[in-house]
Image: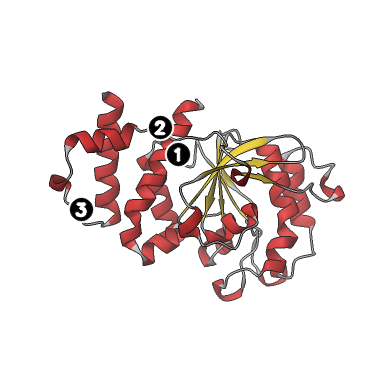
């Protein structure tokens, strides 16, 4: 009961902070309780829910720590984006966390500070994390792309492909229990699909790495998208509830 009340309060705060107009009087208390406490299924039910990632490039095999991987990214000169970016944006948060967030690519603020998920979208992400009892001290954050694309354009398929060996090694070293793919680019890169984010969000998939590591993953809307489409925050909250339940099961 206490957990239900806590999540209900978090739901109200989430809607209030996000500016979503929502009339709770139209929802029966029984329905609210059932939705909040419903279980999120993480187990794979069929092959389409399993994604196998290819083995990282051989030059990364000696990267046995996050520090060595970070240095490898800093030393890497094979991506043209690095020549126009101010900083390499590697990660933020707690590398010992059970939950890892993978975003798309750094924006202007992230490029200036060298930290992922800043600016207005970063503030919204912080609110999303706070709504389920998470923050940057107990969550690990990174991106698919480590350098800002000029003009904040979307990264090309080639740029994503260049960075993917580092991303796969990153996941392997962090060993998260839950991998949250924030936005369409991250979901497409990890799942190897062309489907839009609206079709894949909120569904659990198992990521299998060549090392044998298996990670439960879920895709969610990027906060930058939610700022442009505030009506979709109701769906985002449903996804957050699934993540919250999964976190509770793994702690």
Asked whether disc 1 touches disc 2, contact meaning CB atoms under 8 Å apart, the reply is: no
Classify the position of the N terminus by image quarter.
top left
Most foreground residue, 223 or 55: 55
Colour convention of the picture: secondary structure
Decide: is 224 above or below 67: below
Compare residues 121 and 132 and report the one nearer the observer: 132
The secondary structure type at the circle numbered 3 is: loop
Residue that sits furthest to the front in the current view: 46
> Circles 2 and 3: CB distance less than 8 Å?
no
The mark lying in front, picked from 1 and 2, is 2
Could you give the CA–CA distance between mark 2 and mark 3, rounded to whole angstroms?
Answer: 24 Å
Left or right: residue 89 compared with residue 118: right
The numbered disc on residue 40 is: none
Residue 198 left/right relative to 28: right
Q: Is residue 175 above or below residue 203?
A: above
Q: Residue visible at 35% across and 41% down?
A: 131
Give the answer, above or below, for where 66 lies relative to 89.
Answer: above
Q: Secondary structure at mark 2?
A: loop
The mark that comes first in sequence, 1 or 2, is 2
What residue sits right under mark 1 in the picture?
243
Residue 162 location, x and y as percent?
Answer: 75, 61
Q: Residue at x 25, y 33 (%)?
A: 33
Disc 1 versus disc 2: distance between alpha carbons? 10 Å
Quickly name the residue at label 3. Answer: 22
Q: Earlier in the sequence, mark 3 or mark 1?
A: 3
Q: Position of residue 132 (x, y in %)?
A: 38, 38
SS type, badge 1:
helix
Q: Residue 89: give x, y in percent of width and height.
A: 62, 56
Marker count (numbered): 3
Point 62% across, 70% down: residue: 149
């Amino acid at each position: 009961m206490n957990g239900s009340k806590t999540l209900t309060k978090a739901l109200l705060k989430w809607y209030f902070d996000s500016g979503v107009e929502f009339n709770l009087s139209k929802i029966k208390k029984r329905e609210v309780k059932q939705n909040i406490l419903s279980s999120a299924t993480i187990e794979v039910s069929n092959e389409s829910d399993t994604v196998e990632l290819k083995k990282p490039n051989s030059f990364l095999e000696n990267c046995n720590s996050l520090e060595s991987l970070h240095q490898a990214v800093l030393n890497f000169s094979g991506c043209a984006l690095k020549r126009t970016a101010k900083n390499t944006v590697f990660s933020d948060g707690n590398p010992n966390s059970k939950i890892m967030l993978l975003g798309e690519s750094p924006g202007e603020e992230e490029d200036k500070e060298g930290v992922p998920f800043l600016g207005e979208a970063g503030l919204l992400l912080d609110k999303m994390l706070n709504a389920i009892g998470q923050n940057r001290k107990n969550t690990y954050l990174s991106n698919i792309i480590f350098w800002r694309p000029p003009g904040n354009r979307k990264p090309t398929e080639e740029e994503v492909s260049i960075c993917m060996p580092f991303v796969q090694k990153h996941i392997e070293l962090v060993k998260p229990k839950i991998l949250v793919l924030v936005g369409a680019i991250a979901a497409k890169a990890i799942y190897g699909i062309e489907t839009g984010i609206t079709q894949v969000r909120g569904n659990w998939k198992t990521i299998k790495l060549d090392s044998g590591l298996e990670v439960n993953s879920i895709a969610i809307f990027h906060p930058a998208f939610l700022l442009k489409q505030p009506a979709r925050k109701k769906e985002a909250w449903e996804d957050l509830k699934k993540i919250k339940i999964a976190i509770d099961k793994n702690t």
